[in-house]
Image (cartoon, rainbow, N blue to C red):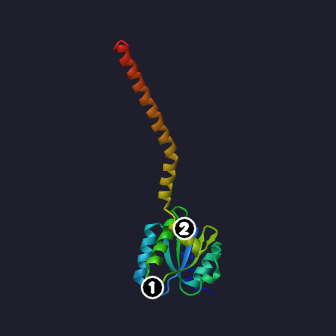
Amino acid sequence: MATQIKIDKISRLKEEIKDKTNFIFADYKGLTVAQISKLRKKLKEVGAKFKVLKNSLAKRAFNELGIKVDENIFQGTVSVASFGNDIDILKPIKVFDEYIRYDEKKILKLKYILLGNEVISEENFKAMAKLPSREILISKFTSILKSPITNLCIVLSGIYSKLILVLKEIEKKKSSGG
């Protein structure tokens, strides 16, 4: 039977992840406390929460919440970054990708990526990390939408300018008596 301490830990973990829909599980074996703290801080800056998990408690918490994850991930050392849909999902992905790319020893290893109800492969994860951020995509989209209107305004203003020039020439001819 589970002790009260374990039950409390499971309850706290469930409380932390119950509103989250996106999870990045990683093997952190070999990372120092300072490295974990640095990664945790970077993820917090983008709105994600990073936690080192105790396998049996995490497995139980995810099962009780009905979050379907591959149970094989709960072997060895496991950490999870969790975040909801209220943030740009690319930001935590980019933080992990950057950390993995610039880690000389290649210690941090992705185990399992669950975005919503979709399990994402490591190849797709890397492809997503290369995408521009949401803000940049919105900016590019608005400039695409704005471009035809801007061009139309330029053409119309050119026509207007030419009309004014023609009218001024007609006025000059009439005033000069011709």
Residue behind mark 1:
105
The residue lying furthest to the top in this view is 177
| Identity of the residue drawn at 52% across and 52% down | 141
What percent of the width, then of the height, locates residue 129?
A: 51, 69
Q: Which amino acid does label 1 sit on?
A: Lys
Earlier-in-chain disc, 1 versus 2: 1
Q: Which amino acid does label 2 sit on?
A: Met
| Identity of the residue drawn at 51% across and 67% down | 130
What percent of the width, then of the height, locates residue 60?
A: 62, 80
What percent of the width, then of the height, locates residue 76?
A: 56, 87
Q: What element carries label 1?
A: loop
What percent of the width, then of the height, locates residue 148?
A: 51, 43
Quadrant location of the N terminus in the rendered image = bottom right
| Identity of the residue drawn at 58% across and 82% down | 57
Q: What crowding class fits label 2: few (fewer than 14 Cα within 10 Å), some (14-19), or many (20 or more)?
A: some
* 75, above or below 96, in the image: below
Q: Does residue 15 appear anywhere in the picture? A: no
Q: Residue 128 carries which label?
A: 2
| Identity of the residue drawn at 43% across and 83% down | 104
Find the distance from the CA under tag 1 to the CA under tag 2.
Answer: 23 Å
Q: Which is nearer the eye, 74 or 114?
A: 114
| Number of numbered discs | 2
Q: Residue 3 carries which label?
A: none
Q: Does residue 49 appear anywhere in the picture? A: yes
* 122, above or below 154, in the image: below
Q: Which is nearer the eye, 121 or 164?
A: 164
Quadrant location of the C terminus in the rendered image = top left
Q: Which is nearer the eye, 138 or 19?
A: 138
Question: Which quadrant of the structure image shows residue 75?
Answer: bottom right
Question: Which quadrant of the structure image shows residue 171?
Answer: top left
Q: What element carries label 2?
A: helix
The residue lying furthest to the front in this view is 178
